[in-house]
Image (cartoon, rainbow, N blue to C red):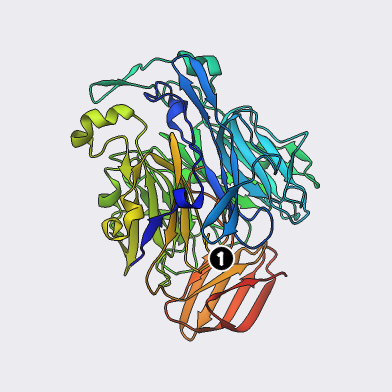
Amino acid sequence: MPYFVDIAAEAGVVAPTWCGRDDKPHIMESNGTGLGLVDYDSDGDLDLYLVNGWRLDGEEIAERGRDVLYRNEGQGRFLDVTEAAGLGSDAWGSGLATGDANGDGLVDLFVTNFGTDVLYLNQGDGTFEEHPNSPNLEGWSAGAVFFDADGDGDEDLFVGGYIECTLEEVLMEKPSLVWEGIHVMLGPFGLEGLGNLYFRNLGEARFEEATVESGLEDVGLFYTFGILAADLDGDLDLDIYAANDSNPNYLYENDGGTFQEVGLWSGAALDEGGNAQAGMGLAAGDVESDGMVDLLVTNFQQDMSTLYRNLGDMVFEDATRSVQLGAPTFSMLSWGTTLSDFDQDGDLDIFVANGHIYPQADLVADKVGGGFRQPNLLLIDEGGTFVDVSSEAGPGLAVEEVSHGLAVGDIDFDGDLDMAISNVDEPPTLLRNDTDEPGTYLLVDAPHVVRAEATKGDGTWIRHQVIGGSFLSVNDPRFHFGLGQEQRLDALTLVWPDGFRRKIQDVPTNHALKIWR
């Protein structure tokens, strides 16, 4: 059984992430912010980047929160190195994407903001410099992903837009929607959507906007939150899936760098009843170990999170009820999520970060199933169905905050997966996985690999490259295999986008590998 302990305070991760006023009269104040687990200094361990917003007092700006970079010092300690790294933006931040924008092998940071988005280029000496011509979706942008859309070796950028609004509108907003008999914020319906944008990388971090010609146009001006890139049709290039709030989700199928939106046709845009949901966060992974990437979408309270089973040929079906995901997620308003193997038994589990958008939910908590602060959920895969073990998974799961962003990775380098969670108007939660006697593992760092396959006898474990997802956050990009009690593998096979395969024989478990082509 996974067992989690919140170590944020003792680790020194104490900076709050602000998001407007306590009563949240404008929808932007309910959005929260993302965060990322990323090895910015290339020392092998995961550092932590926190995106921050602003604190408001009435119609005034009380505090411009600053983004924070924490360097992993080992031994459970993180050091604030924001100033030394040349970071610390005081824009109203939203989300984070990471990638190698200029092809120098270093991790760059792209921060989406309310206002101007910013690309920070890694200088390789522990510092960053702001790109003078950063690709930008001016407005309230949300999720973003770096990915090689056209197979030319450069990482392109897709940025999701939520709504069109001004700071004056945020500051002057008053509750104008009646929900459960209570006046709350308006939105997203009734507000103008902000279109998504695609930026083609011309090399050396030179970007050109190419949304329409690529087929990635946001025709509906839907309210996009989470975005991920993964090979959903098995042809080795990366497709795009976008969670849209209160509208059908987008699925853009990649055909050699040109995309076609096939969400409705694919079955991954609506729930089993043909209804659009309030898509927030995303995850992807091979839930059934059949070699195909399934999709998970988190949604609004009383709208359950949705699992789309991949049937092949870019066709999906809503499998939420068959895997028993509906009941534990129905009463939650859910955001960041993941499909990860927390107990290292070989199959993928689900974690969901929860929190309401209305502080007024506390007044009707008994009626709607939960208040403003909500517990997070850990659901373990037991033979093809998901079982809620949150109450048994340690004191870290007893923490109730308004949790939004979620990042997954091995922060203490012991092989099992830990988590960082951003909380609205509070410091983050840092969940260390202290599972007693977990299964064996293999951690594989293989840049640009689309698919990794581990084999032992008749057993096969498959992991796919998934970029982005969760909610405005960044996970450790390395492939993590939970391997039960296996001490050695017969082989590890890696597949690149052009079909090149590399097979490594007789691989010991319980260690990390760095593999180049």
Q: Amino acid at mark 1?
A: Phe
Residue ID for mark 1:
479
| Occupied quadrant, residue 180 | top left
Could you say where residue 123 lies in the image, as x and y percent from the top left?
A: 77, 48
Q: How many marks?
A: 1
| Occupied quadrant, residue 106 | bottom right
**Residue 422 in view (yes/no):** no
Quick check: 338 above or below 87? below
Q: Residues within 10 Å of mark 1 (few under 14, many from 20)?
A: many
Quick check: 218 above or below 227? above
Quick check: 507 above or below 196? below
- Label 1 sits on a secondary structure element that is strand
Could you say where residue 465 lies in the image, as x and y percent from the top left?
A: 58, 60
Nearest the viewer among 125 and 499 is 125
Q: Is residue 159 left or right of residue 267?
A: right
Residue at position x 52%, y 19% in the image: 61
Quadrant containing the N terminus in the rendered view: bottom left
Could you say where residue 515 lies in the image, as x and y percent from the top left?
A: 68, 71
**Residue 398 in view (yes/no):** yes
Quadrant containing the C terminus in the rendered view: bottom right
Residue at position x 28%, y 30% in the image: 361
Q: Is residue 478 left or right of residue 434?
A: right
Residue at position x 51%, y 68% in the image: 414
Could you say where residue 494 lies in the image, as x and y percent from the top left?
A: 63, 72
Q: Is residue 24 left or right of residue 495?
A: left
| Occupied quadrant, residue 435 | bottom left
